[in-house]
Image (spheres, rainbow, N blue to C red):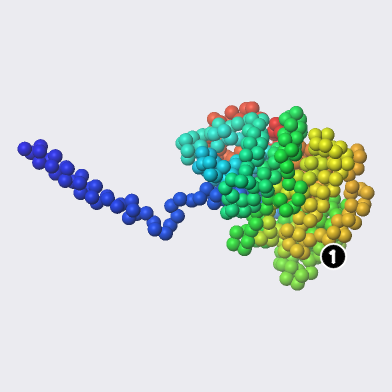
Amino acid sequence: MKKIINYLLLSISLVLMISCDKGFDELNTSKTGVISLDPAFVLNNAIINSFSSAVGTSTLTYEMPIVQQMFSSNTGVLFGGNFNQTSFSNTVLNWTNYFQNSINYSSDVISRTKNDAKRTNLYNMARIIKANAFMILTQTYGDVPYSEAATGYTNNNFFPKYDTQQSIYADIIKELTEASGALDPSGTIETSDVLYSGNIVKWKKLGYSLLLRAGMRLTKADPTTAQATVVAAFAGGVMISNADNAIIKYDANFGNGIGTTLTGTEAANFHLAQPFVDFLKNSSDPRLAAIAVRYVGAKSGADQAAQITAGTGDKTAANQYGLPVGSTDGNANGAGGSLPGGGTQFAFTQADRTRVVKKTSPMFIVTAGQTNLLLAEAAFLGWIPGGFVAASNYFAAGVTAHMNQMASYDPGSAIAAADITAYFAIPANQLTVGTELKQIGEQYWVASFLHGPEAWANFRRTGYPALTPNPSSGSEVPGGFINRLSYPPSEILVNSTNVQAAISVQGPDNLATKMWLFK
């Protein structure tokens, strides 16, 4: 009898629990909050983080100083490529940004749309963005997690293996080829996408332009695959007009990472490098006046700010003087005194923070200027039709496109058509037989200004421009250039087995080790 009573009480308790739970999910579900996020918005996050503030800091501290476009003589927290030294707080920035943001977000979109017949365009757009993120990751560090990346949440795999750069590039090419070909203008149009508002024709051009970039990246490592990839990209259709540029736009609330730094606490400390200024100056390039400003006689950041307020900063190309590579605050301070008009290091030329590096300035993922220059190289190599004539036309189109791109930063940076015509009237500024690769490489360097990952990658691949290594006495690669960035210390601590396996194949985990792409 006691047992029966116990069962009865238990049954009553269960009924009461079920009754109390009835409607619990409904009660605890927000009537106004977001409970399911459209994967199109997740993809936007992946796109925006293709050039986040972290990537901007990496560009300023490593990539642009390495290719001698812009750097700081300051020995503080933003040092790195300016002295050819390791700064773990800065070498990790591309890693953390792309894995935590672009890779995770795009992977999430891919997994949620892969089997959704109504969202095949979104699925393939995500594949393109993910491929771009991995191109930057592997060209920065070498071998990285790829096949097992972003599987921590899905498969509880928190210790992903590292894939070789060769296998990563093979799959990147596959992904870009398939995704670009599968995009369908008759399918669902994802109007909320921040790049092209769902314009599939432009998305296809972006995909094939990245495929062209991937193919040309292999010219040293695997010329056969490089040629086949370039031929396929050209046949698919790449961007050749600025109207197709892949642009991330910013506003006062969501700022450009480089612009935020260069209009904030570090505004006074970054200068254009002497080789970059001299190259533009010596070729009478109108882009120098569109990019640069010098605060003549300045001895402090306050002096610079006063000239900005007064509108007296000198933007004349002939009066620009870049900071010598390898400068520290001390010797830059002394050199400043010898500049026309005097001053200290603060009187050297800067990227104009009121025009090209504003907080609201756009960032470019892929441009027609870059793409035309890659086509010029491909035509010179005989991989696409037209020979030297086509190479010359693509070369001129690439330089012209980048000159016209200047107006996208600010109306004050727009270059007049007459100035472009005058530039090409100089024979030395036209593509010349015998110096084609040198000229194309130099112009790609200029056309990739402010896109550090791309400028650095193409410099390592081509060797152009022919820069003199940073003479800093503290260089960890004396007499040479930084070839890669070191793996994050956190990876070595947490994922040690897989990191050490990669190091054993690739080479020492330091700035000097050359990776497969650029050997």
The x and y percentages for residue 200 are: 64, 47
Q: Nearer the viewer, residue 395 or 502?
A: 395
- Does any portion of residue 491 appear in the rendered image? yes
User: How many numbered marks have been drawn onto this rendered protein structure?
Assistant: 1
From the viewer's perspective, is 13 left or right of 217? left
From the viewer's perspective, is 143 left or right of 27? right
The x and y percentages for residue 354 are: 72, 64
Q: Nearer the viewer, residue 310 or 136?
A: 136
> For the point 43% across and 57% down, which residue is it?
33
From the viewer's perspective, is 196 left or right of 497? right
Tag 1 residue: 341
> For the point 85% across and 48% down, which residue is it?
396
> For the point 68% across and 38% down, which residue is it?
139
Q: Secondary structure at mark 1?
A: loop
| Type of the residue with mark 1 | Gly
From the viewer's perspective, is 244 left or right of 53? right
Q: Nearer the viewer, residue 361 or 488?
A: 361
The x and y percentages for residue 440 are: 83, 43
